[in-house]
Amino acid sequence: MIKSTYQSLLLAFIFLFWFISPSSAHNNTAHDSSSNLNGNHEGCFSKVYAFGESDTDTGNAHFLGGFVRNSTTRLSNGRLVLDFLCEALSLPPIPPYKEPSANFTNGVNFAIAGSTALSRDYFVKRNVSRLIWKGVPMSFQTQIDWFEKYLVKVGCKGNDKGLCKVDMDNSLFWIGEMGVSDYTSALGSPVSLPWLTEITVKNICKMLKALLANGAKYVVVQGLPSVGCLPLYMSSSSEHNRDHMGCAATANKAIMLHNKILETKLAKLRKMYPNSSILYADYWNAYLTVLMNPKKYYIDEAFKACCGSGGGKLNFN
Ligand SMILES: *[C@@H]1O[C@H](CO)[C@@H](O)[C@H](O)[C@H]1NC(C)=O
Ligand SMILES: *[C@@H]1O[C@H](CO)[C@@H](O)[C@H](O)[C@H]1NC(C)=O
Ligand SMILES: *[C@@H]1O[C@H](CO)[C@@H](O)[C@H](O)[C@H]1NC(C)=O
Ligand SMILES: *[C@@H]1O[C@H](CO)[C@@H](O)[C@H](O)[C@H]1NC(C)=O
Ligand SMILES: *[C@@H]1O[C@H](CO)[C@@H](O)[C@H](O)[C@H]1NC(C)=O
């Protein structure tokens, strides 16, 4: 009981503070543990199961051959939020599901960069743009399928129901940002944004229900950041389509609606699954905190693409 309460408190704490730590943004080296999450959280959770897209994927898309990566299996030259989370829990970084001969003792990362709520069929039939993924993108359903396969073949194999439950009760389920690739694929297409929001949130909830039905007890769900502030969105929308932050207004409006609906649905899920703790992680405000005070976080360019080409204000073509 004490442990449960502590686990819940820790979750609440993580999402109040993890994202506003300048020192963790500044220094990506493995030995830097000066984030606000320091302190001893060892033993709170023995496993982390993660789901999501490029912000959370530590190698699945890479091992699937989804795109060419050079020196890292992440879509980042530094650590992801998930890496900091594991560190705070004194767990090793959790390996991607597709990593050959990985050690899943401390959890599995099922996140796939570029995966979508929209089905693979949708992309095949309509030939809509695929900016990240080389072929037809994987859908969220693939992550659910992998998770269920993992439980049968590894996670709960040979364990009776009781042991499996103990295992679930000591696991943290991290649902990273999901849906950005759907909004991206809709750019410049006639797809209606409210329809897309409905489909995306519906599929996130479908995934959550699959996890909860399998016994997930501690679940954190990230909302979406201000996608309209990314170079891709800003360069593909008119200069007149701007919000008070100077970002693509239509996209950001859609994302705000997405987050609002997601929060409403999470409230419903909490009622349906009273024995589970389901937290919403406010990625929107975390992201804006950094974007609006870049210097404080040692970021020189808040809007410009680091590694694009094309020059101009956004260095994006
Ligand atoms: C990052 O942290 C490491 C280890 O604490 C330190 O040696 C290094 O100087 C730091 N780098 C920067 C840019 O602060
Ligand atoms: C891989 O990285 C090296 C060194 O960082 C660079 O010179 C090379 O062009 C990169 N290759 C690709 C395919 O990105
Ligand atoms: C897997 O990791 C666990 C925990 O770090 C360790 O105890 C175990 O020996 C590892 N298994 C293998 C086969 O390396
Ligand atoms: C799909 O779109 C690409 C690029 O927009 C185009 O080159 C290709 O011909 C299209 N394929 C079909 C079957 O319409
Ligand atoms: C919640 O847990 C209690 C105590 O273990 C149990 O009796 C009850 O059936 C559970 N409720 C649901 C909805 O699983």
Image (tube, rainbow, N blue to C red):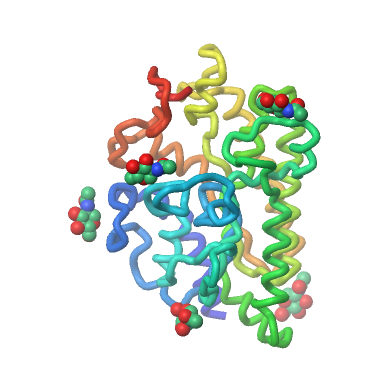
Q: Quadrant of residue 135?
A: top right
Residue 270 lies left or right of residue 28; in this view the side is right
Question: Percent position (x, y) of residue 52?
Answer: 59, 52
State the residue at coordinates (57%, 72%). Answer: 171
Image position of 102 (left or right of 127): left
Left or right, residue 29 beside residue 218: left
In this rendered view, identify the residue nearer to me: 161 or 142: 142
The front one of 168 and 127 is 127
Q: Which residue is located at x 77 percent, y 38 percent? A: 124
Task: Depth check: give the residue in front, 14 or 156.
Answer: 156
Give residue 249's position: percent from left, percent from top. Answer: 56, 23
User: Could you tell me which quadrant the N terminus lies in?
Assistant: bottom right
Corner quadrant of residue 37? bottom left
In the rendered image of this protein, does residue 61 appear above or below residue 298?
Answer: below
Inspect this view and state whether residue 221 appears.
no
In the image, residue 40 lies at what x, y percent?
A: 36, 72
- Kindly give the residue lying farthest to the top in the view shown: 240
- Residue positioned 67% across, 71% down in the render: 150
